[in-house]
Image: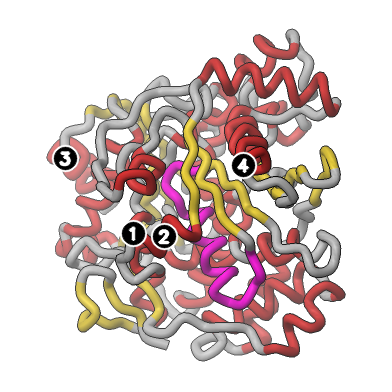
């Protein structure tokens, strides 16, 4: 299959180039030349299929022309070594738990798949692959875990100083080995801009053999569509779910759109954001106005210029009307989020993290406006990753910290502080990576 840039359909590359180079030279994003659908037989039987079987079918639809079935099955099986259970708070209110992976965040699915696919694509090469990634919280930890001590790779993670939780920061800075953390004095948008600038510097990108692990990389999105199908099959026969997606860079929601393109029956999508409401504002008024992000307690969604918005536009033929007929946007304040954390605990005995709480608020609002709808809210991270917020709302030590996260608490932080200036970052790369 060939892949083209969202900015220029005539710029086309093969799978290896699209995955390993990540970003086209025109600053667009790669999309498949043709979007696949799954056959009718799959949709007749998917409710009886395992999570891994669903994943293999989806991965084959996207990558089967370029990766042998045996290799692709190994990649999928190595990715899905943990479940994504659906929890019912009430008959029409469901939570999809995506935090059962090694770093307790939904991005484990995408990062693990991507690491394995990249290893497959570079297995006959002797060049070191440099994975460059910006994170607003969970991406960096998932990527660090997926690539830690993988031969032939080194990982450079940029994160905004003072804008990730303490345990999230330890997941970025405590592993060592082939993982390097850069603490940028700026916002996530500043980190993302530096990463994109590095890829657009073609001489630098080629010399350092750069690839991205952000959701600008298509191999991050495809495996995230696995769990949309996996969750929908757990609902009663004939029900079309409303997926409510806590959203920052909008990779997760784009993955849901890919699942629908494959043939998954979906009633609607809801983009749930915090004060960083660029996409909900667009859906309301038809004008896309990126702006600097603001800090909130749901920090992984603190994005003012979501990179996957251009993919969303492409999927809807750049039609505002088409997008808003499929996606609703809602935003909520920190105060509303805090109330929701307490309310979900008191009503259902369920501990929900700040991002999931934003999603739950949006799901409740959607059901009020559309009685009879059945919502699935994506719970994207374990609440233990946000101890300050959870302790403040539910009481100190109210959330048990899983062992694989608690073990990092006393590990030393190892990070290099940099300002957000491009030349400073470029000079650091040149001095430390070459």
Residue depicted at 30% across the width and 82% down the height? 13
Name the N-terminal-most of marks 2 and 4: 2
Report how far apart the C-alphas of labels 2 and 1 lie in the structure.
Answer: 5 Å
Q: Which span of residues is magenta-colored?
A: 247-266
Image position of 147 with respect to 264: above or below: above
Which quadrant would residue 163 be assigned to in this image? top left
- State yes or no: residue 250 in magenta: yes
Query: What residue does disc 3 label?
Result: 422
Q: Do labels 2 and 1 touch, CB within 8 Å? A: yes
Between 285 and 419, the residue placed more toward the observer is 285
Residue 380 shows in the view: no
Q: Count neighbours of disc 1 (C-alpha within 10 A) and say few if under 14, some if 14 to 19, many if 20 or more.
A: some
For the stretch drawn in magenta, the main secondary structure is helix
The numbered dot on residue 395 is none
The numbered dot on residue 320 is 1
Name the N-terminal-most of marks 2 and 3: 2
Q: Count neighbours of disc 2 (C-alpha within 10 A) and say few if under 14, some if 14 to 19, many if 20 or more.
A: many
Secondary structure of the residue carrying tag 4 is helix
Q: Is residue 187 left or right of residue 267?
A: left
Report how far apart the C-alphas of labels 2 and 4 lie in the structure.
Answer: 19 Å
Query: What residue does disc 4 label?
Result: 369
Secondary structure of the residue carrying tag 2 is helix
Name the N-terminal-most of marks 3 and 4: 4
Residue 71, image x, y percentages: 63, 82
């Amino acid at each position: 299959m060939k892949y083209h840039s969202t900015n220029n359909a005539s710029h086309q590359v093969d799978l290896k180039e699209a995955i390993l180079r990540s970003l086209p030279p025109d600053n667009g994003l790669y999309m498949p030349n043709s979007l696949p659908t799954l056959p009718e037989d799959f949709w007749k039987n998917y409710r009886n299929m395992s999570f891994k079987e669903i994943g293999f079918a989806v991965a084959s639809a996207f990558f089967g022309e370029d990766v042998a079935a045996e290799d692709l099955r190994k990649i999928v099986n190595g990715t899905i070594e943990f479940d994504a259970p659906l929890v019912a708070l009430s008959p029409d209110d469901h939570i999809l738990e995506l935090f059962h992976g090694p770093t307790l965040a939904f991005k484990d699915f995408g990062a693990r798949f991507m690491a394995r696919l990249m290893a497959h694509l570079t297995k006959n090469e002797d060049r070191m692959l440099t994975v460059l990634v910006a994170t607003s919280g969970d991406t960096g930890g998932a990527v660090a875990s997926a690539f830690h001590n993988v031969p032939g790779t080194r990982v450079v993670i940029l994160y905004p100083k003072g804008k990730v939780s303490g345990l999230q920061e330890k997941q970025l800075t405590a592993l060592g080995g082939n993982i390097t953390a850069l603490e940028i004095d700026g916002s996530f948008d500043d980190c993302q801009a530096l990463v994109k600038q590095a890829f657009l510097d073609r001489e630098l990108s080629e010399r350092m053999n750069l690839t991205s692990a952000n959701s600008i990389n298509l191999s991050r999105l495809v495996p995230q569509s696995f769990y949309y199908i996996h969750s929908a099959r757990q609902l009663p026969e004939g029900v079309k779910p409303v997926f409510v997606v806590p959203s920052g860079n909008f990779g997760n929601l784009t993955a849901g759109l890919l699942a629908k393109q494959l043939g998954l029956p979906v009633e609607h999508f809801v983009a749930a954001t915090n004060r960083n409401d660029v996409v909900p504002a667009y859906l309301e008024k038809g004008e896309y106005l990126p702006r600097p992000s603001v800090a909130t307690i749901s920090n992984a969604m603190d994005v003012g210029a979501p990179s996957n918005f251009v993919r969303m536009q492409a999927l809807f033929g750049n039609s505002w009307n088409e997008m808003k007929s499929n996606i609703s946007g809602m935003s909520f304040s920190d105060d509303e989020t805090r109330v929701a954390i307490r309310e979900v605990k008191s009503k259902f005995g369920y501990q929900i993290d700040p991002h999931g709480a934003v999603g739950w608020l949006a799901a409740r609002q959607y059901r009020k406006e559309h009685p009879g709808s059945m919502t699935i809210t994506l719970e994207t991270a374990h609440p233990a990753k946000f101890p300050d917020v959870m302790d403040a709302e539910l009481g100190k030590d109210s959330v048990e910290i899983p062992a694989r996260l608690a073990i990092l608490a006393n590990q030393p932080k190892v990070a290099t502080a940099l300002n957000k200036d491009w030349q400073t970052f470029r000079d650091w790369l040149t001095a430390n990576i070459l």
